[in-house]
Image (cartoon, rainbow, N blue to C red):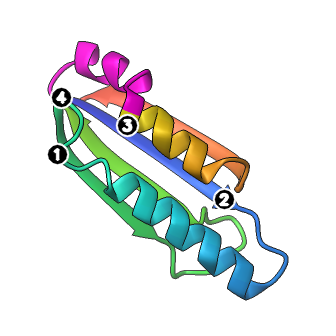
Amino acid sequence: MIRHIVMWNVRGDTPQQKAANVALLKRSFESLRGRIPGLLHLEVGVDHSAVDYACDVVLYSEFESQAALDAYANHPEHLRVKGEIGDIRIARHQVDYTAA
């Protein structure tokens, strides 16, 4: 099993704009549940610590294999989500690893 973890910071000139962008990102990725072959688990978390070094949103997902994760990258539903969230991201961090 491959774990795919992505963390983002999002744009927002006001707290309301930032909250709307966080909600859009969360809703968009959660819409992938049940639509991607080999995607076993998907969870989206929103930071509430508000520490200056925290990311705003985290995606935790599990794929049955590296091949499934590779296919996800170009899957039409994933590409749809990338289009929906557009340029609201200002930073992105990713870790993929094999679960022990």
Pick whichever of labels 2 and 1 is earlier in the sequence: 2
Residue under label 1, please give it.
34
| SS state under label 2 | strand
Q: Quadrant of the C terminus?
A: top left
Front-most of residues 72 and 54: 72
Farthest residue toward the top?
A: 67
The answer to whether residue 21 shows anywhere in this view is yes
The magenta stretch is 64-76
Pick whichever of labels 2 and 3 is earlier in the sequence: 2
Residue under the point 43% across and 21% down: 74
The label nearer to you, 4 versus 3, is: 3
Front-most of residues 57 and 100: 57
The label nearer to you, 2 versus 3, is: 3
Q: Position of residue 21 (x, y in %)?
A: 63, 69
16 to the left or right of 83: right
Pick whichever of labels 4 and 2 is earlier in the sequence: 2
Q: Is residue 75 magenta?
A: yes
Q: CA distance from mark 3 to mark 1?
A: 11 Å
Q: Quadrant of residue 83?
A: top right
In the picture shown, does residue 32 fall above or below 57?
above
Q: Is residue 67 magenta?
A: yes
Q: Amino acid at mark 2?
A: Asn
Residue under label 2, please give it.
9
Q: CA distance from mark 4 to mark 3?
A: 11 Å
Q: Are marks 3 and 1 in contact (CB under 8 Å)?
A: no
Q: CA distance from mark 4 to mark 2?
A: 28 Å
Front-most of residues 11 and 56: 11
Q: Main secondary structure of the magenta part?
A: helix
In the picture shown, does residue 79 fall above or below 22?
above
31 to the left or right of 27: left
Q: Amino acid at mark 4?
A: Pro
| SS state under label 1 | loop
